[in-house]
Image (tube, grey):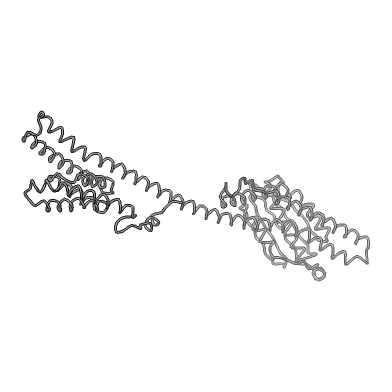
Amino acid sequence: MTTTGEDDTRALTGPWWWARWRSAVLDGGLALVSAVECGIEGIPFARDAGIPPAVGVAFGVLAGSMLLLRRKWPIVVVLVSIAIAPAQMGFLLTVGGLYTLAASELPRRIIGSLAGMSLVATLVVTFVRAQQDMTRGEMDVGGWFVPFISITASLGVTAPPVLLGLYVGARRRLMESLRERADSLERELQLLAERAEERAEWARNEERTRIAREMHDVVAHRVSLMVVHAAALQAVARKDPEKAVRNAALVGDMGRQALTELREMLGVLRSGDGGVRGGPSEVPLAAVRVAAAAAASRAVGEESAEAGPCLSELDELIGQSAAAGMVVRLSVEGEARSYARQVEQTAYRVVQEALTNVHKHAAGAKTHVRLAHRVSEIAMQVENEPPSESASASSARLPSGGNGLVGMKERVSALGGVFVSGPTDAGGFRVSAVIPAS
């Protein structure tokens, strides 16, 4: 876990302007050494200036202790070091101030100007001091030595701390940039994880709805026919035993077909493992959920589409309804051709569910099933007439969950089609759907 800027602010536990006590102790120790250095160097300065030594020592201690402010006001420290340069004191103060100045976030022009001023001050002081020593005879060298020693000393005091400070400052800014990027990446990953969790929840809900719709389509029609045949069996059991036997056989066939389709559906659900490998430590939980939901949805959808019904089975479907006592007629317009499996399966399910609704709500009503093959679409319509009073009175009273029309509309809409249902003027009911052929 990276440390954000807010965490860095809370981590400031040092006194005053120091982030940590360790930094405060370090600056205090450097200021103490600088004060001692400047205090010692203040003795010869007082002697040359003709002032009491105690004043020179106090002046040096005060000037050297300014290094304590290097993190807060680096410009002040550098200016003080430049100011006391003629007194030939403050070596540690100069080095520490220039390093802190170069490593700070101040504009480069300010850093360059102050570093140049310090370089010039050191160069002038060194040149004057070397010239005085040569004049007094303390140094017996050529005329080239004074400029050489002046330039070398000024560069030696100024360049190393400035270059080191620039390097440390650049490295610090790079680390802060990397930390900010890491924080941003962490926030993005957290956002992606939340979105992945939302997508996984959406995929789970979609899969539940799709499975519920598929189970309804598989079971409702078969069970409805079974109930209709059972009611007919009860009505003719004593009057026509042979017909009762046939109806019982039909009920048994319908039950076996319903069980077979249920087993196929459950087998598909069990085999949809999603293709995810690796444990929770290898794959993020949200990614596993999304991959599993998507792969399971694809696996169930593809396998159920391959095993699902097609338009060529409409005759058998209508024959089953006719065997249950429904007067149903099928008319086909256009030249029959093959469509995508999902299109054929959806068209079949629409007709199947419409016939199931006729069994439930209008038992015995005459029903017309129309199928039209067009250039770029396939259209289907199931319309029933009003049931007779005697047929309505003898209805098997099948329960309805209210999900049939909703499921049909969802199926058709998922393929970009149009679904319309509603009562007719004659008192019957009509279900119409148009599905794109591609």
Image-based side of 222 in relation to 132, left or right: right
Between 65 and 117, the residue placed more toward the observer is: 65
Q: Is residue 7 left or right of residue 275?
A: left
Image-based side of 24 in relation to 282, left or right: left
Closer to us: 231 or 91: 91
Front-most of residues 25 and 252: 25
- 234 to the left or right of 200: right
| Residue drawn 84% across the image and 59% down it | 251
**On screen, residue 369 above or below 164:** below
**Where on the picture, by quarter, is residue 412?**
bottom right
Q: Quadrant of residue 407?
A: bottom right
Tell me the residue at 13%/33% (across/down). Answer: 147
Residue 213 spot, x, y in % from top left: 68, 58
- Closer to us: 336 or 126: 126
x and y percent of residue 216 in the render?
72, 59
Residue 321: x %, y % from top left: 80, 58
Please tell me how many numbered marks the rendered image carries: 0
Instruction: State whether residue 130 is above or below residue 43.
Output: above
Q: Residue furthest top?
A: 142
x and y percent of residue 19 in the render? 33, 55
Q: Is 327 situated above or below 127?
A: below
